Image (cartoon, grey):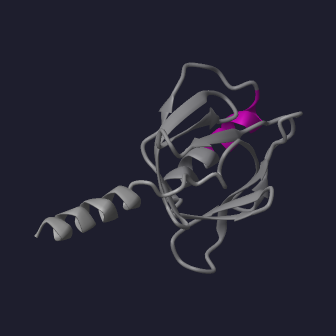
Amino acid sequence: MKYVLVAMASSLALAGCQPMDSSLAGRWRVQQIAGASLGENVEIWMTFDTAAETVSGFTGCNEFTAPLSTFGESLTIGSVSEGEGECSSIAAATDEQRFLLVLPQVQRRIVRGKSLELLQAASGSETLIRLRREDAAE
């Protein structure tokens, strides 16, 4: 009986020691939302913190943060909390609306080098948000 308990405890300890997902680490700049490029001079970016289970960034008008859940290829983003601020242009306001509209629909991700695609659950579904990893020097 002791050996069974020790074996079960060891298995649970090992399960909790899975390596952190570093493929999302860093800052990602949004390139497209639902297939459309961002407006002129609009910047939207995201930073994923899988250890703290949060995503934060800039919507084009305001800073934001939201809970994050990842497992394998799946990725979900919870309710977004935004800071106070004003949009610098109509293009920024439009892109912010589009970004916040598709964000809750994200259910999976594909990382290819410096490219990240956030998609709905169905395989072959349209890319909701296309991002590019920013280098530390940028």
**For the stretch drawn in magenta, what is the main secondary structure?**
helix
Which residue is painted at 79% across and 36% down in the image? 42
Quadrant showing the N terminus: bottom left
Q: Say whether residue 124 is magenta.
A: no
Q: Is residue 86 left or right of residue 89?
A: left
Which residue is painted at 54% across and 23% down in the image? 83
x and y, in percent, of residue 123 in the image: 58, 80
Q: Is residue 40 left or right of residue 96?
A: right
- Which of the two residues, 63 or 7, is positioned nearer the viewer here? 7
Above or below, 137 relative to 106? above
Classify residue 111 by image quadrant. bottom right
Which residue is painted at 52% across and 34% down in the image? 65
**Direction left: furthest residue:** 1
Which residue is painted at 56% across and 32% down in the image? 64
Q: Which residues are magenta?
A: 89-97
- Which of the two residues, 8 or 34, is positioned nearer the viewer here? 8
x and y, in percent, of residue 72 in the image: 52, 66
x and y, in percent, of residue 21 in the image: 58, 54
x and y, in percent, of residue 106 in the image: 53, 59
Classify residue 12 by image quadrant. bottom left
Q: Say whether residue 90 is magenta.
A: yes
Quadrant showing the C terminus: top right
Above or below, 101 relative to 46? below
State the count of labels.
0
Q: Is residue 60 left or right of residue 63?
A: right
- Which of the two residues, 97 or 15, is positioned nearer the viewer here? 15
